[in-house]
Image (cartoon, rainbow, N blue to C red):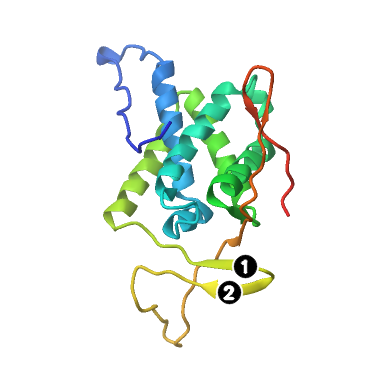
C-alpha cells in the first residue's frame, strides 16, 4: 500500500462554541499514515538510497511502499501499542532497508525514525494532529525548493570512500575557504543475500531478529 503525502484539513470548532466531536478512526489512520511518510522523508539513509537507486530502478516506489508496510505492521501486530517499542520498530526498519534497499544502516538514525513514528502515533491516537500538520508544511516548503540533497559517507570492504552530493555543482566555502559539510550517515551496502521471512500459523510475516553486522 503506497502512501501519498496529502494532508486532510482539521475539524473546525463547532459553531456556537459547542463541543467538537472527536476525530473518526478513519481520519486518525489517515493522519498516522501521513506521519509515517513524513518521518521517512526526513531519514537521510533512505533518501540516499533513493537518490542512488540502491534498491533498483523502482527504488522511489519502494520508498512509498515502505510507509504502507509500516502502517500494516502496526495494524497486523496484536497489542501493537504495548508490543511495538522503539527497538522492535527499529529492527523492522533495518530489515526492510536491508532486504529492499540493500543497505545496512550502522548509525542510530533508524532508532530516531522509530521513536518519531511512535511519538506521532501516540499524538494521532489522541486526536492531536498539530505536529503532523507542521511536518507536512515543512515538507511542502522543501519540495517547493526542489527537495534537499544529502551528504553521505559510504563504506565498502573496510575502505572508507567519502562522497557528497549537492544541489549545486560547486560547493560553497566559508571565509576561510573551508567547505561546510553536513554530518553523513554511516552506510554499508548490504550483500544481496535476502533474509528469509518467518511466517506464523495465521499467515503473518514476523520480524526476524537478525542482528546488525
Residue drawn where x is 50% and y is 30% of the image:
71
- Up-down relation of residue 136 to residue 164 (above or below): above
For the view shown, which residue lies furthest in the left direction? 15
Query: Residue 158 or 57: which is nearer the viewer?
Result: 57
The percent coordinates of residue 99 (x first, y second) are 59, 45
Residue identifier under label 2: 161
Q: Label 1 neighbourhood size at 10 Å, few (<14), some (14-19), many (20+)?
A: some
Residue drawn where x is 62% and y is 39% of the image:
92
Contact between labelled residues 2 and 1, with CB atoms less than 8 Å apart:
yes
Residue 200 placement, left or right of 177? right
Residue 28: image quadrant is top left
Q: Label 2 neighbourhood size at 10 Å, few (<14), some (14-19), many (20+)?
A: few
The percent coordinates of residue 125 (x first, y second) are 50, 23
The N terminus is located in which quarter?
top left
Query: Residue 24 or 206: which is nearer the viewer?
Result: 206
For the view shown, which residue lies furthest in the bottom direction? 176
The percent coordinates of residue 118 (x first, y second) are 57, 34
The C terminus is located in which quarter?
bottom right
Residue drawn where x is 40% and y is 35% of the image:
3
For the view shown, which residue lies furthest in the front direction? 193
Residue 183: image quadrant is bottom right
- Up-down relation of residue 67 to residue 59 (above or below): above
**Label 1's element?**
strand
Count of numbered marks: 2
**Label 2's element?**
strand
Residue identifier under label 1: 155
Query: Residue 175 or 181: which is nearer the viewer?
Result: 181
Amino acid at each position: 500500500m503506497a502512501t501519498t503525502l496529502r494532508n486532510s484539513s482539521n475539524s473546525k470548532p463547532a459553531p456556537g462554541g459547542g463541543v467538537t466531536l472527536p476525530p473518526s478512526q478513519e481520519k486518525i489512520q489517515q493522519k498516522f499514515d501521513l506521519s509515517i511518510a513524513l518521518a521517512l522523508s526526513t531519514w537521510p539513509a533512505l533518501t540516499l538510497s533513493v537518490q542512488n537507486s540502491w534498491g533498483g530502478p523502482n527504488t522511489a516506489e519502494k520508498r512509498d511502499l515502505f510507509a504502507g508496510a509500516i502502517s500494516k505492521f502496526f495494524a497486523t501486530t496484536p497489542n501493537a501499542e504495548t508490543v511495538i517499542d522503539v527497538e522492535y520498530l527499529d529492527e523492522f526498519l533495518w530489515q526492510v532497508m536491508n532486504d529492499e534497499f540493500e543497505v545496512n544502516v550502522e548509525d542510530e538514525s533508524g532508532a530516531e525514525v522509530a521513536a518519531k513514528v511512535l511519538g506521532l502515533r501516540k499524538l494521532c491516537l489522541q486526536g492531536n494532529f498539530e505536529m503532523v500538520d507542521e511536518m507536512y508544511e515543512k515538507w511542502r516548503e522543501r519540495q517547493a525548493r526542489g527537495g534537499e540533497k544529502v551528504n553521505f559517507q559510504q563504506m565498502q570492504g573496510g575502505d572508507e570512500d567519502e562522497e557528497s552530493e549537492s544541489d549545486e555543482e560547486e560547493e560553497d566555502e566559508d571565509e576561510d575557504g573551508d567547505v561546510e559539510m553536513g554530518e553523513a550517515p554511516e552506510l554499508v551496502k548490504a550483500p544481496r543475500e535476502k533474509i528469509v521471512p518467518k511466517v506464523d500459523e495465521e499467515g503473518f510475516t514476523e520480524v526476524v531478529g537478525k542482528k546488525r553486522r
